[in-house]
Image: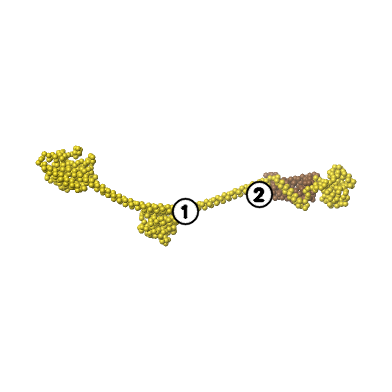
Chain colours: A yellow, B brown
Amino acid sequence: MNRRRSPIPEIGNEKTAPEYAERRFAGRDDARDEASRLRRFRMNALNDASSELGRYSRPGEIVEAFLLTTLGVMGAASGFFLLFDREEEIGEIVGRGIPQDELALVKAFLPRIEEAYFSGSPRFENNQPPRPHILPFSGQGEGPPFPEDTRLVVKWALDGRRRGLLGLGPKITNRPYDAGDGDFLLSLCALLTQAMRRAASLEDVTRLNRELMAKNDALEKAAAAADKDRAALDRRMFYLKTHNDAVNEMSGLLDAKELIARFLLLAMGGVSAGKGYLALFSGLGPGEISSRGVDAELLLDIEGGDVSRLITHMLFSGDADRGQGARRGFIDDPEVLVRAGLPGDMPGVWFVADEGAFGFCGLGDFLSGEPLSGEQREFLLTQTGALTVFLRKAKLFEQTRRLNLELEAGNRELREALENLTRSRREADGLKQAAERIKSLVRGELGRAGRVNPWDFIIILAISLVVGLFFNYAHPGGVPIIPAGWSRPPLQAVDATLAREAVDAGNAILVDARPREFFEQRRAKGAVNLPAALFDFVYGMNLEGQDPAREIIVYGHTVSRRYDADVAELLRERGHANVKLLSGGLASWEEKGFPVER
Amino acid sequence: MNLAAKLGNTLKSPWLALVFRLYIGGLFAYASIYKINFPAEFAETIASYQIVPYFGVNLMAVVLPWIELMSGVMLIIGVRVRAAALILTALLAVFTLAIAITLVRGVPIGCGCFHTIEDPISWKTLVRDLIWLAMAVHVCLYDRVLRLEGRYRLRIKGIE
């Protein structure tokens, strides 16, 4: 079945190798011994070849050994083997008994040979390669340029990858190859297949082993690298932790002085430095310097101007790592440091905190005794970055506090001013109200002054009354307010007719009590004028010596004065008991028609 | 402005009223002094007019001079001018009436205006009193300057 399906055409008279051998030796009894000998020989040869091939493990060696063995047992004068390896894409040629130039020619045509014989699908049914078979080959003049003496070509394949062509030259005996040779050759090829398969397995194992070892190596390398990485990571972790701690510590500080002192300690601890200093400037003069383990005299000469020049130079020259414009950087060139007045043996970090504030932190006496590593520099720079942030923060805090204080003071003043203003305004309001009240009062008074108020009269009259009465009471020449007549006993009155009779009879004296002007103007005839004002004088003149018992009739009163009563009283005081008033007075006298003098 | 208007203005002038005011004030203040000092004599004078009832004569003699004095002083210094002027105008009116009555009655008495002993009342006395009465009325109507109270009015005008 396999035979029938093989794509390769059968060789010679279209018989397979066993058939060919069978036919060749069948019926020839005379040659039976010969044949059995030959078979034995071939069995031994196969056995030998098998053990011979088992000694090699590399395909090249195997092929070479196989070719030699084959040539030997087949009795061929020359032969070659073309081995193709699809994966390696090269062909290998092994030749024996073939001139070098022919071998070279074949070698040159190897790709074409491969293409001509193996261009089919490299895959096989059931993954089984076709069994080796002898190709029909009729000598030179056609096909690929095999060596000239090639008589027999066997196509051989181990698997999809390794294929080969075995070519044999003429027998030494110069006899042609028969069917037995063919079978034998195919058996040998089967041995080759086994050997090659074993070699391939071996090669696989070797390759796998090699790969395994390579992987092992890689694994070890990776483990070493991982260890290294872990160490670096630990270091990094340490720096990060230190940085974190530093940030935590510095974040609580708001005073620049404390901040730089703390920073110096942290930086020295972070890079294991034995001494260090930090100079912070806010101008060109001497700045704030904090130091640890450094001779203070070394730091006395550090001036802001020098450091400022250095930093300006660094700012514009740029740092290799950070490029131009970075606000901090590392300096370890002693010459540069000394030129800026800084100790040359202490490399460090310069930084610019903000406009006008800058500084330098130098460190020395490192525990490791080596210059700072890149990581340490990186750490210092990071740390310095944090410091600048906190310095700015401290400055801002200071500014904020100052502003707050100013604001508070301003507020206080404002509040006081406001209170003053309010007080003044209240006072002004009060004054204004008072002024309004006074004004309205005065205006009211003036309004009243323009008008006539009944009270004016009442007051004037009342004051006059009180003052007048009081003055009159105190005045020696005061007058009695209550008429005196009211307190005297009533006097007897006499009718005008009776009075006339008494006067005419000379029994009575008629007295006119009125003032002289009235008396002279008109009087009753025969009356004597005796006004009260001149009583003593007139009485002495006219009535002195009169009989006190004699009747005296007094007249003369007006609506305003009781002259008669007053004078009658005076007369009674003089002892005249019979004093009477003329009833009705002078008017009654006149009415009666009694005489009146003018 | 014609002459009549000018004259009218002059007659209504507050300064003329001031002159009258000072004159009348001084007159009464002066007249009151004697009456205050001699109340008995003044009481006789009042009685001589025979107008006041006998029980009111002395009281009037005691009080009236003080009224005259207060009103006169108030006119001079310019306090409650109008009230004082009105009082004096009333007094003058009463006096004039009294003189007129006395003249009609023909009672031969002195006026008693300033002193107890004076010439008897005559028509001249009445005319004099009428002139004074006119002056007092003028003061009532037109006086408004140089008052003590006026000082404050000016001040207030200054404030306003």
Chain of the residue where label 1 is placed in the rendered structure:
A
Q: Residue at x 44, y 58 (%)?
A: A288
Q: How many dots with numbers?
A: 2
- Do the residues at discs 2 and 1 belong to one chain? no
Q: Which mark is residue B152?
A: 2
Q: Circles 2 and 1: CB distance less than 8 Å?
A: no
- The Cα atoms of the two marked residues, 2 and 1, are separated by 65 Å
Chain under numbered label 2: B
Q: Is A211 in front, or is A304?
A: A211
Q: Circle 2: is it few (<14), some (14-19), or many (20+) Cα within 10 Å?
A: some
SS type, badge 2: helix
* Residue at the extreme right of the image, as rendered: A505
| For residue A248, side relative to residue A466 (left or right) | left
Where is mark 1, residue-wise? A398
The kind of residue on which mark 1 rests is Glu
Q: Picture coordinates of residue B9 (x, y %)?
A: 69, 45
Q: Nearer the viewer, residue A459 or A73?
A: A73
Residue A16 higher or lower than B27, as above or below: above
Q: Secondary structure at mark 1?
A: helix
**Of the numbered discs in the image, which one, if any, rests on residue A495?**
none
- Location of residue B83 in the rendering, given as x and y in whole percent from the top left corner: 71, 46
- Taking the image as shown, residue A266 lies to the left or right of residue A114, namely right
Q: Quadrant of residue B96?
A: top right
Of marks 2 and 1, the one in the foreground: 1
Q: Position of residue A146 (x, y in %)?
A: 17, 44
Circle 2: residue type: Tyr
